[in-house]
Amino acid sequence: MKFVDEVSIFVKAGDGGNGMMSFRREKFIEKGGPNGGDGGDGGSVYLIADENLNTLVDYRYTRRFMARNGEKGGSTDCTGAKGDDLLLPVPVGTTVIDAATQEVIGDLTVAGQRLLVAQGGWHGLGNTRFKSSTNRAPRQTTPGKPGDARDLKLELKVLADVGLLGLPNAGKSTFIRSVSAAKPKVADYPFTTLVPNLGVVSVGRYKSFVVADIPGLIEGAAEGAGLGIRFLKHLARTRLLLHLVDMAPLDGSDPADAAEVILRELEKFSPALAQRERWLVLNKADQMLDDEREERLRQVVERLQWTGPVFVISALESEGTEALSQAIMRYLDERQERLAEDVAYAEALAELDRQIEGEARARLQALDDQRALRRSGLKAVGEADDDDDDFDDDDDEGGAEIFYVR
């Protein structure tokens, strides 16, 4: 299944039906009076969160959606039929934005949640509505009101408890394969992961959490290098970030340098996201002896001046992954309990979430604007003259897949 996380669509609610002008005409009944009915309301357009969907691919090529108009009123005081509402299913985690104003209309974060995006037009009034003691044969009617029309931008952010960060080939996909039933592609070359992958990690009998693996970042990703930072938005709603670092890179580079590259790109994308709880995970420990592991761990921690939790694992051999999963589950449980008990802590996290959402949207909007300038043949101020368009990702016919399994 092709993974699409951003689409633009046009929605149009139905117009209200016109009121009817009619008079009662029956044999042996004189001066029957007005009997024109009202029109029907136009149908509205709703987006509804569907837990069975995990991509916006259904809106990739069909982008215009219109609800039915209301029927006009009839004689004998008959009201016109109401136009049917149009329900558009979207994945849970979809943010709806007005393309004209960039206003966030709403977030669909709960299965079954509905969001009104275009209100149907109000019905017109028939001439019966205007009769009075002084106006016994009214010939006034009103037309139905037009329904709302909007250009919308839909952005999908996968809902996960834990997000994975790291350079290409840091072992993120191997880790998610090791701890869950997800089977993302794993290979010995960079950028094997092209779209986010989700895996459900079971801890114990009745506890589990969701892990999100995004394509790897490289230096300059904030400026569009590699796959850029468009997928970082999927980490905006996570509760914990795992920063995976290859502790035994084949090119002999310093793992601390690799970690600093990710930190710089993360801060460029969203300084608030860089403040999210983050754990350092040194992967590929199976390629080193025990004493070498300890020395490498000490060097990385000292170089980064790291004070948070640190784990040494081998995702390939499933070494240390069980202990890491247990620690994650404990952290998530304790976090949930603290949110319920500590009001100040809950408010601080809510404010951080708002900052992350705002910064991420502003950064992605800036990249979209720069992409539009490139397509028009212009260059942004200070932008190098480069023929390569790293932002042009419209051609995604590669058939990339997303896996969401238990």
Image: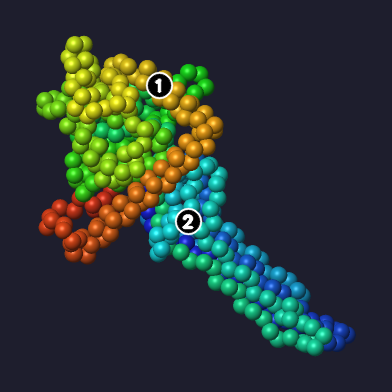
Q: Which mark is residue 327?
A: 1
Residue lying at the far front in this picture: please name it. Answer: 344
Foreground pick, 289 / 398: 289
Foreground pick, 274 / 147: 274
Q: Is there a contact, CB below 8 Å, between mark 1 and mark 2? A: no
Circle 1 SS class? helix
Q: Could you tell me which residue is drawn at 85 percent across and 87 percent down?
A: 30
Circle 2 SS class? strand
Say if residue 161 shows up in the picture: yes
Foreground pick, 29 / 11: 11
Residue 302: image x %, image y %? 21, 24
Q: Quadrant of the N terminus?
A: top left
Q: Amino acid at mark 2?
A: Ile
Q: Could you tell me which residue is drawn at 48 percent across and 18 percent down?
A: 204
Residue on which disc 2 sits = 105
Image-based side of 218 in relation to 181, left or right: left
Residue 128: image x %, image y %? 75, 79
Colouring used for the render: rainbow
Above or below, 334 relative to 365: above
How far is disc 1 from disc 2 in space, using C-alphas? 37 Å
Foreground pick, 51 / 328: 328
Total numbered circles: 2
Residue 182: image x %, image y %? 37, 28
Q: Could you tell me which residue is drawn at 52 percent across and 66 percent down?
A: 148
Residue lying at the far top in this picture: please name it. Answer: 290
Image-based side of 218 in relation to 155, left or right: left
Above or below, 94 relative to 187: below
Mark 2 neighbour density, 10 Å: few (under 14) some (14–19) many (20 or more): few
Residue 52: image x %, image y %? 48, 40
Image quadrant assignment for residue 272:
top left
